Image (tube, grey):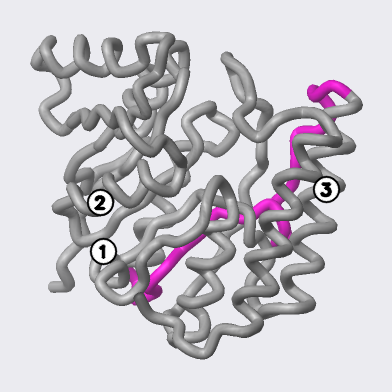
Amino acid sequence: MKKHLSLSVILPTYDEAENIRPLIESIAESLEHLQEIIVVDDDSPDGTADVVEDMIESGKYPFLKLERRYKNPSLRNSIWRGIELASGDAVGWMDCDFSMPPRYFSVLLSLVNADYDIAAGSRFVLGGTWRAEILEPSDTILAAIGSRLMNFFIQVFLDHRFRDYTSGFVVARRDIFKRIKLRGDYGEYFIDFIYRALKLNYRVVEIPYVWAPRRRGYSKTGSSFKDYFRRGRKYIATVLRLLLTRKYDN
């Protein structure tokens, strides 16, 4: 009988005190083969780490771990630290604001268990979309149109087999990261990771999900044209760098 892979879920946090407890509980309820949830917090001033610490001390969450980071804050660095600490057969991560449905971790894990190497949630495959009807109009236009245009650009210049290069909602076999180290900053690390995985012939699959606005707190991406332009420049620079890449591992 085939072994079911265990999953280490990494939650990179900064100022998510209002979301983190219900998110952890939702993930735990949806996963049968949960190895651990590792919260990697970038010294959040709102007390996110304290909420997690209280949960651990309650004794009700034996699978829960906390790593506090005080230097070099970044999304990529937090995820990578979680990968270093993970002990599951597979690792996964997501945004910590409920914009991604945590119950989908079980679906992503089942696909990796079924011989895919990487399974990612996607807004841009058939069935995936945005819950735009409950967003502010400016946010809808900037987030939805900006992401679609950026992903179209990336597909044209890199690899059209993958659709949502700015997803960041993923489960992957842990041993992949012996060959592929995460590189980049806020969101471009995911473009870099997926493209190199495809070039190294890892089996990658996307499943649709419906993106929703964050429940509480503020967006780390930003909500103005200036914010999206700043992010977009880094994404384009990453695409250009990858076009010149000939070595895809490490």
SS under mark 1: helix
* Residue kind at label 2, given as amino acid type: Leu
* Residue kind at label 1, given as amino acid type: Arg
Q: Foreground mark, 1 or 2?
A: 1
* Residue kind at label 3, given as amino acid type: Gly
SS under mark 3: helix
Distance (Cα) linking label 3 and label 2: 32 Å
30 left or right of 167 in image: left
Residue lying at the far front of the rendered structure: 71
Residue 40, image x, y percentages: 31, 34
Task: Return the residue at label 3.
Answer: 146
Depth order, front residue of 205/30: 205
The 10 Å Cα crowd at callout 2, few under 14, some 14 to 19, many 20 or more, is many
Q: Residue at x 53, y 50 (%)?
A: 185
Residue 212, image x, y percentages: 67, 32
240 left or right of 59 in image: right
In the rendered structure, which segment of residues is drawn in magenta? Answer: 113-136
**Circle number at residue 174:** 1
Task: Return the residue at label 2.
Answer: 7
Image quarter of residue 233? bottom right
Distance (Cα) linking label 1 and label 3: 31 Å
Q: Is residue 87 at all visible to an observer of this figure?
A: yes
Depth order, front residue of 168/249: 249
**First reached walking from the N terminus: tag 1 or tag 3:** 3
162 left or right of 129 in image: left
Residue 15, image x, y percentages: 46, 18
213 versus 193 height, above or below: above
**First reached walking from the N terminus: tag 3 or tag 2:** 2
**First reached walking from the N terminus: tag 1 or tag 2:** 2
